[in-house]
Structure formats: structure tokens, C-alpha cells
Image: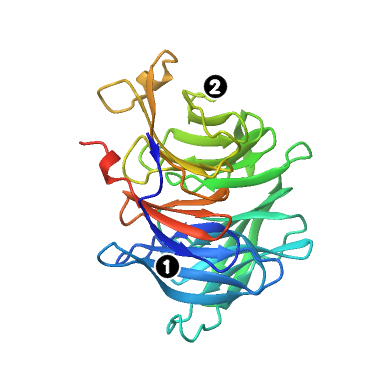
Amino acid sequence: MQGGSTGIGYGLKYQARCIADVKADTDHTSFLAGTLSLKEENEVHLIRLSSGGTELVCEGLFSHPNEIWDLASCPFDQRIFSTVFSSGESYEAAVWQIPELYGQSNSPQLECIASLDAHSSKIKCVLWWPSGRHDKLISIDEQNIFLWSLDSSKKSAQVQSQESGGMLHHMSGGAWDPHDLNVVASTSESSVQFWDLRTMKKTNSIEYSHVRNIDYDTKNKHMLVTAADESGIHIWDLRMLKAPVAELPGHSHWTWAVRSNPEYEGLILSAGTDSAVNLWFASPDINNELTSDSLSNSTTKWTESLLYTYNDYEDSVYGLSWSSREPWIFASLSYDGRVVVESIKSHVPRK
């Protein structure tokens, strides 16, 4: 099923790629979005869905010095977030704090809590552990993975450990396992690598080409979803990585982002450079809970269906985020700076 957007729109002034759910804001459905203008002063917008759910309101507008290529909100402090940004040919990463008194009218300055300045290669992303308060951060560049110790009160971040991805692996991103704070997955041109942060050593891998994006399933500790440039979306059982347990066709051009729903198992969002967002449902054909026996059986059949295509976009969709507070709501961001918030309530499976 496909159709135009029935969602609520909000326009950024400049082009943009990055949007993130403000998980720590338990009173509002909020998102942070960052712009990517080459010539103008860039901005971070704090956007909230109104109490009636009928409009998006700018609660804060903050200047940011450079083009924002990655943005992630701190999961335990709604005023803290990280960005990866470029200045000419160099890339930097920092942790920022929104001032206590803020509003659209006075546009106060963001406070830089810490600069993640140990990188010598192009930085790709900064990761927060999504499942609780944790004083560690992960940053990934094309060659290395770093584990940082963050002290926001002292405004400092120190490298705790680091490791090279290896000469054959040009790293492009990653995800932190919400079920295990010692495990991080990184993507590269030819594989997904799994790391044990206690030893900073690789523990396993998925040999698969051109994985663009990955996301852990927060409801099922054994499931991982990947999006590849041209070969679509794959669902993996982390206990048997030789082949995916299910495949979805993806997009008509590159599949850029994929997100598992934080509450409803089997619901997956994907976005692509075909100017569309797809809502999928994928689940094994078993009546009981996923078990080791059922999923380690390679003959287990899966139900896979495209529930809806949102195609009322005029540019590639790079940003995609579920709301943690209202998991039937998601936000998308197309390159032309258009934010759209949609409700999928009609597609939520009945329990």
C-alpha cells in the first residue's frame, strides 16, 4: 500500500541529513535535527510534537559551526547530544549541551562539553549506549573505533581504548547493542564486524557487501537488521550469521537507513534515495516467542510484507527515527530539509 504523506511537516532552512529522537524527554515527543549547509551558519532544531498531536513546534534553535553529518541524542539527559561535523576536508566530533534557558527567540549558544579530538581519519558516527545511563561513548572513523570515558560535569572526554578496523575494512558506521553494553557492531564496505569493548577485539562478523546502515532489535536480543546499497534489507539471527533469516526488497535506489521499532516486534522502517520511506512487517511463522531451537532451524519460515510506502517526498530521505515515547510515531528527514512526523497506529499489530 502506498500513498502521499498524511503526516505533520516542519521545514528547516537548509539541507539536512540528521534527525534523532530525544529519548530522555519523557514528557514530550521530541526530535533534534541538524543542517548541512556548505556556505551558511548551520543550525540544530529542537522540535516537539504539540500536545494535541497536530503540529510540530520549534522549542529551540541553536547555531552550530559546521555541516552536521551525524547527530545523536544522549539517552539519559535531554539537553545533551553529539554531532559529527566537517570543516573543509577535516571532520570533527563533539558533545554539546543545550543551555537551561532556551527558546527560539534568543537563539542561545550551545555549550561544548567535550571534543572527541583523537581521530586522524574521517569520523563517521558517535554512539551512545541506548539502554540506560552510561559514562562511555563510542566514536568510529574510517580506520578506528574509540571508546571514550565522558565526564559532563568536568567537561571532559578521555580515550579509554581504541583499535584499528584493519587494512581491509573501511568503516562507515555502527550500532551499540542495547542488550549488552560490551558489544558494538561496525559496518564496512565488505562486512559487519562485532567488537567486545572489554578487549577491543573483533568477536564475529557478517561477510556482506555495501552495508549502509544497521540497527539492533530492542525487543529481541538475537535480531539485527541491515540495509545495503542495492541488495535491500536483511534480518539476521546473531547466533547464525552465515545467511540472513529473512530478506526484504528495500528501495528502488539505495536503501540508506533502517530502524526497528522500539516497542512493536517485527515493525521496521527503511528510507532511501528513491525519496520514499517504507514500513515493513517481518516475523517468523511461529506462534510462541522466538527461541533458540526455532530460530536456529534454518527452515523456519518468515512472514514479510510491505505495509505502507510514504512517497510524498521531493528529495532523498536520509534521516529516520522512531519516537521512544510514542512508538507508533516516527520522524523522517529528506535532504531538502523537510521533517515529516507520521503515525502508524493503523498498522500496529494487535496483541
Q: Name the foreground residue: 67 vs 75.
A: 67
Q: Secondary structure at mark 1?
A: strand
Q: Name the foreground residue: 327 vs 131.
A: 327
Where does the image place residue 175, in percent across and percent down from the top left? 54, 46
Pointer 1: what residue? 47
Disc on res. 143: none
Q: Which quadrant holds the N terminus?
A: top left
Where does the image place residue 55, in percent across and percent down from the top left? 34, 65
- Residue at the location (42% across, 19% down)? 296
The quadrant holding residue 349 is: top left
Q: Is residue 90 left or right of residue 147?
A: right
Pointer 2: what residue? 243
- Residue at the location (74% across, 48% down)? 143
- Residue at the location (67% across, 73% down)? 40
Above/below status of 17 relative to 47: above
Q: Is residue 228 left or right of residue 171?
A: left
Q: Which quadrant holds the C terminus?
A: top left
Mark positioned earlier in the residue sequence (2 or 1): 1
The quadrant holding residue 78 is: bottom left
Where does the image place residue 178, in percent across and percent down from the top left? 44, 47
Where does the image place residue 316, in percent across and percent down from the top left? 58, 48
- Check the image and name the residue furthest to the left: 351
- Check the image and name the residue furthest to the bottom: 106
Q: Residues within 10 Å of mark 2 (few under 14, many from 20)?
A: some
Residue 212 in view: yes
Q: Secondary structure at mark 2?
A: loop
Amino acid identity at mark 2 = Ala
Total of numbered circles in the picture?
2
Amino acid identity at mark 1 = Ile
Using the numbered discs, state the Cα–Cα distance from disc 2 to disc 1 in whole angstroms: 40 Å
Q: Residues within 10 Å of mark 1 (few under 14, many from 20)?
A: many
